Amino acid sequence: MAENVLVVHGGGPTAVINSSLYGVIEEARESGRIDKVYGAIGGSEGILRERFMDLLKFPEEKLKLLLETPATSIGSSRYALEQKDYEAMVDIFKKHEIQYVLLNGGNGTMDTCGRIYEACKGEGIRVVGIPKTIDNDIAITDHTPGYGSAARYIAGTTAEVGVDVKSLPIHVCILEAMGRNAGWITAASALARKQPGDAPHLIYLPERPFHEDEFLEDVKRLYEEKGGVVVVVSEGLKNELGEPVVPPIFKTERATYYGDVGAFLAELVIRKLGIKARSEKPGICGRASIPWQSPVDRDEAILAGREALKAAMEGKSGVMVGFIRDVEKEEAGGVYQMRVETIPIKEVMMYERTIPASYINQRGNDVTDEFIRWCRPLIGPELRDFIDFKEEYEKR
């Protein structure tokens, strides 16, 4: 029987999801066991429509482009699967002699992975998950491929905005970062700082209740001190009652759509403090940017793809590849240490991992040094330096 692989992408893409795909393809080639590596064109819906493309047919020079291609080269979807769909997949896999099914995605995709695993039990089909999400909210794994690049993007963008606001210190600039319930991306903006006083000056995460009065008090104090203030906030900020600070503007059966938190807070600063303010919302730019791609993130994404196929070929199923931080070795040697393990898929299905309390400061308007130490290795090389002649002049 042929040993064929099927790779499926689910949910929102990242700057390195294609790198995991590349890792699967390279591992398949080197193993000498795999006949075809199919990509499901268009995510889980592509399985049901049998839209499969053999990626091993492409030359290496084409496949290497995956490492620098944003989004997902085989497409993705948020298609709502039903139980009958999972059952139908088994016959489709058999028809195409697919022995290994690898699903690359976030929480929803890992839930799909677990359900496909259950449907395929006893059929000789192995199902393995490859973690992927810029939100970094998958359980057990220390971090997820995709996060390091999104973190590098928000840190770099915040640093650049910070220089702009410092050079013309006349307003408050509020950057809104993605992350509805988990503030990992927002928190990473802190890595923009090179020295005390650098932006961001305030950071607000969805893990802590947002207090409007404290926010205005902090902004006013910093504005009077600096003249220009940079604030980074999560799109999912909630008040003391757990309600979004910006009410929903539209609802469907499957989703709720909110207005811009950054715009809301900028308007609040103008109305309540009489200070000029503006908002910026990078949005999906942070998950689509290849220039800000973290090389650490890219290499780990390749590794995740390789290890997922290895695990499947070794007979493992119903698991997800995860990254485990070796904290003791890291602290002893001062160098980032990580190993790969397989995690039972049932332990990660639809469990949302948020930022721990020890990563957030007491007032809830910044992150701690503990978070900085954890996050710093994931974004790759140091951010670029800037020259400030005005600062040099004022030192004399």
Image (spheres, grey):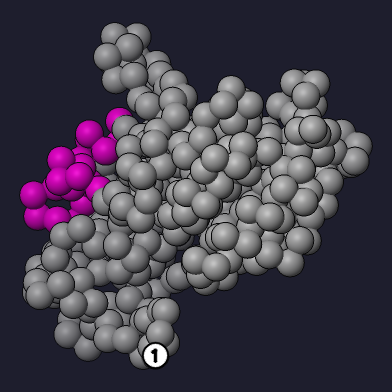
* Quadrant where the N terminus is found in the figure: top right
Give the quarter of the image for residue 216.
bottom left
Residue to which mark 1 is pinned: 250
Is residue 266 something one can see in this rendering?
no
Count of labels in the image: 1
Above or below, comparing residue 324 to residue 118 in the picture: above
Above or below, comparing residue 96 to residue 12 in the picture: above
Q: Residue 396, how many percent across, how many down?
A: 33, 38
Give the quarter of the image for residue 240.
bottom left
Q: Residue at x 22, y 88 (%)?
A: 271
Give the quarter of the image for residue 303.
top right
**Secondary structure of the residue carrying numbered label 1:** strand
Q: Residue at x 46, y 37 (%)?
A: 319
Q: Is residue 367 magenta?
A: yes
Q: Residue 368, how many percent across, how many down?
A: 20, 41
Q: Residue at x 20, y 71 (%)?
A: 238
Q: Which residues are magenta?
A: 355-373
Is residue 357 something one can see in this rendering?
yes
Q: Residue 232, how many percent across, how many down?
A: 33, 61
Q: Residue at x 44, y 71 (%)?
A: 280
* Residue 124 falls left or right of residue 153: right
Q: Is residue 293 magenta?
A: no
